[in-house]
Amino acid sequence: MATAPKIVLFEDDDNTGTVIERSIRAALGKRGAVIRFDLKTSSQDPRELSRSYDDRISDSFRSKPFRNVTLIVTDRDLSKNEPYRGLSEAVVSRVAAMHGFPIALYARGVRDSVLDRTREWGEGRIILDYAGGPERLGRQAACVASGFDEVRRRLPKARKDRKNNTPAKVLAAILGVANVSDRIALYGAGDQGMIDEILGTRGRSAESLRRQIRLLGYWLWDSIMRFPGLLVGAVSAASYLNIAPSTFQKPAIRKLFANALYDGPFSGTDTPYWWRPQLDAILHSHKCANGRELVRKHTGKLPPRCPCSVDSSIDAGYYCVLTEAPVSLEHSRSVTWFPPGADLSRVSTPAYNERGPWLGEF
């Protein structure tokens, strides 16, 4: 398998494709490669033209330049080309699934949102946010590719231990946190299809390994990291610790919680992540009920608390996945399709009342 991330880019606009390719290359640095899939040239053989796009693109991925792909990155709209007129990301997604390659989608003017997936994270694809421009998109793509590559490098050792006989135990071993495998398993509860697919790809062929890497990476990125519970991002960590998010951004404050920083696959995202069990351990070791008390213990000053985004008179403690803001238990609710392990993930009551039908709750 590949020794460095290899990204294949599908983009039908030459100017946009050049900019995105340059951004990804800059983000990858010297470690990794980007290949632009050629959508302009195609065989004029009538027999070749009569074949489906799925078959034609799939054959390309069997050729040497496209072997050992780490990640496919594609625009959702690929219709601006002649040889592949009418091509869509759906075709590329099918080919990616056929070969066991992870895929990430983007669309200009479309922001990444939990509503893009609702309950369908198990479909196996990642949505990149192009709203921040091509440079941010390039960093995201490089981070995702590097994350899958890290899963690939850690997987053989995790599989070698016979005690790792469930997907949760394998992923826990990859992350170096065997003691939280039960909590990782909660993120798979209710998605038996995903668990069955991982269990069904336990062979040692190259294709089987690719599929395991793809599924384990999706599980981590689009469930465990997306829905706060076991891991918490900057805002959800601040809410959990009851420290105002603006205060929690200060290096001197974050230093107090450095031992809880997550450094596994996909940890190079725009926001850092922290292990919640390790945050709890830090508070426990200092005999503090929350993060504010810990800050006061070390600095002598009590930092501003983290107020609920719906009612600022009360503390938050939780995270609204729609508004991406701190929220209290009283002014939020859970959603039936949230992973059971995501006990800090909520939807604020106003957001729920507004978007309930889109959440599949009404």
Image (cartoon, rainbow, N blue to C red):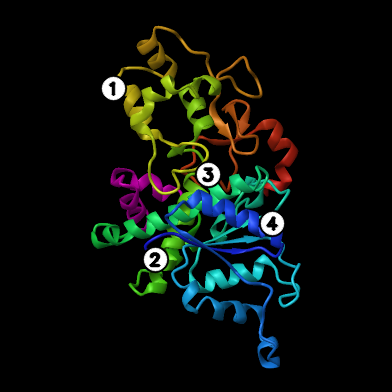
Graded by Cα atoms within 10 Å as few (under 14), some (14 to 19) or many (20 or more), the crowding at tag 2 reads few
**163 left or right of 51?**
left
Graded by Cα atoms within 10 Å as few (under 14), some (14 to 19) or many (20 or more), the crowding at tag 4 reads few
Residue assigned mark 3: 226
Q: Residue at x 46, y 49 (%)?
A: 187
Which is nearer the eye, 316 or 71? 71
Residue assigned mark 4: 16
Residue 113 point in image, percent of width and height: 64, 45
Q: Quadrant of residue 36?
A: bottom right
In the image, which is nearer the foreground, mark 4 or mark 3?
A: 4
Residue assigned mark 1: 285
* Badge 1 vs badge 3, beta-carbon distance below 8 Å: no
> Which is more N-terminal, label 3 or label 1?
3
Residue assigned mark 2: 2
Which is nearer the eye, 237 or 40? 40
Alpha-carbon span between mark 1 and mark 3: 28 Å
Q: Is residue 361 visible?
A: no
The residue segment tinted magenta is 167-187
**212 left or right of 133?**
left
Residue 70 point in image, percent of width and height: 46, 63
Q: Residue at x 33, y 43 (%)?
A: 180
> Which is more N-terminal, label 4 or label 2?
2
Alpha-carbon span between mark 3 and mark 2: 27 Å
